[in-house]
Amino acid sequence: MPYMLTMADEIPRDTLLNRVREQGEVVRRLKAAKADNTQEYREQSDINVELESLNDDLADVSYVCGWWPTSKDAELYDTLRVVVLNDELARWPHLNRWHINMKSFTREERLAFPAVEAPLASLAEKLERLKSTRYISKDTLDKKIAEEVAKLLDLKAQLGEENGCSHKLILKTPKGTRDYNPEQMALRLGVLEKIISVFKRHGAETIDTPVFELKDVLTGKYGEDSKLIYDLKDQGGEILALRYDLTVPFARYLAMSKISSIKRYHIAKVYRRDNPATTKGRYREFYQCDFDIAGQYDPMLPDVECIRVVCEALEVLNLGPYLIKLNHRSLLDGIFAACGVPQSKFRSICSAVDKLDKSPWEEVKKEMIDEKGLDEHIADKVGKYVSQSGGVELIAELRKDKELMKQSVAVQGLDSMELLLKYCGIYKILDKIKFDLSLARGLDYYTGVIYEAILCGDDVGVGSVAGGGRYDNLVGMFDSKNKNVPCVGVSVGVERIFSVMEAKLANKGLKTRTAEIEVFVASAQKNLHEERMKILVDLWEAGVKAEQSYKKNAKLLAQLQHCEENGIPLALIVGEGELAKGEVTLRVVSTREETRVPRSNLIKEIRRQLKTLS
């Protein structure tokens, strides 16, 4: 992430100048690497093998050539800044430890490291091989250059501020975020209120967790998506990151609090360093709306209720036709085993299959072969399975597959799916269900049934609007005794739902009320604002939502026009003649019908009128 400064974290000018020079050298070398066509092209997977080997060697020594830093350490440090993206080194703990140590030296100190006499140590020889590599992907190298250039510009901006240079402030929200105006917030709160009512109908209680977690809590739980985690700068000895979802913090909460059973919902913001597509409801900062059941229960009873919860939420929001895809991780593992996929590649192939909802099979197959290292004939076998979908009849068809039935996990997965579909019939949601073998859900922590809800025929093109599954082993990762708490849950993608609803309202030309005022207290003549105030306080004390103009002598026509423009149902008009008789005029704004009401009966009449209008 770009350097962040606080008042207590000011960088001395000399240090800042050194950083600018060092960062400029990094950018220069990256651009030179891009322009140099003599370098050997290597697959990213090959580079990872080299880095893994370096990591293993550094488990036994402190530096490249043993126990003291040399020029080879400076070379390796510079090479890694070209070859590896900043957030990837955490995958190799010994190499990462060495890298953190190297960062503690200034560039001048690293340049002063002593040269190495031949012969070279084996680790130094591996460095020579690594120096001849470069990214096979131009896009990846471009991304690295953009990242480092952004850091350089940020450092130069800090230096410019120290020199007294002013910089024009650009008013914009950060990429992948947005502001919400009152109309959008009214829509958002209405959606959340309806979803919460569904959660409460099923007996859920709510919790909250910090917006950031220890980075170790989050890493290793999301598979390939771990690269999307937002790291935070070290602020006092703890390495932190913004939460990527609400599920992993929930698992940490269960383990830390020693809770073995709970039915909870949680609505909060999460953060992903993704490529945003705001028109499709994809952001870097967004709300998740989770419902989870934790505890040891009989098979598929909690799972089917989560699916029923999704159906009820989508029905109450009136989003139009939808479909819920179902699959089982055990069945997928059985399919991979039957096809001959090495077990070490199960999760990475699962991640590739997960892209079938966005990419054609040929692209996914190419990724399996070129990036995951899978044999083509094995990929073709996987393709035949994941192209199938259906209902109960698909289960019967798969049971006839002798190779598949040799895999005990596949049999277990089919048994679970058969029971789940039976329960879906009992819960009257079978017509909304599709058993789809291409559904994979790329996150590593899923262990059983998985599901995803999509809108059918919506012209916004937002993709999935809900997804989830069973994750029985996640809590155990945080427990000192590895005690597991079985869990199953679903996350409703409210941002994508907002996008759909906003588009539908815009197409129909409808306006959302942004306030809930029931009565507007108006005056017909001058100097009656104190009488308005007396009536207002009576209404507020009676629980009526009411307001007035903040002008003492506002024109009556302007006050009534305000009511019509803002959808306020009733207007209460105060006049000198009515005051003399102890009355007020109550006006129904939509019909403009007016009636005289005694002050003593005012609250009762307002409530009657509001009930009639609702």
Image (tube, rainbow, N blue to C red):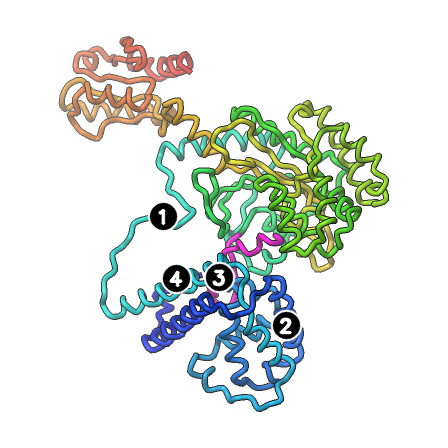
Q: Residue 21 lies in what quarter of the image?
A: bottom left
State the residue lying farthest toward the bottom: 117
Distance from Cα at disc 1 to Cα at disc 2: 40 Å
- Front residue of 135 and 493: 135
In the image, is residue 438 above or below residue 336? Answer: above
* Residue indicated by mark 4: 150
How many numbered discs?
A: 4
Gap in angstroms between the C-alphas marked 4 and 3? 14 Å
Q: Give the range drawn in magenta.
A: 222-243
Judging from the image, what secondary structure is the residue with disc 2 in? helix
Say which amino acid is labelled 1. Thr
Expressed as whole percent of the image width and height from the top left, the position of residue 154 reads 35, 64
What residue sits right under mark 2 in the picture?
55
311 lies left or right of 231:
right
Q: At 18% across and 17% down in the image, what residue appears? A: 524
Q: Callout 4 environment at 10 Å: few (<14), some (14 to 19), or many (20+)?
A: some
- Numbered label attached to residue 173: 1
The residue that mark 3 highlights is: 141
Image coords of residue 380 (percent x, y): 71, 45
Q: Distance between the residues labelled 3 and 2?
A: 23 Å
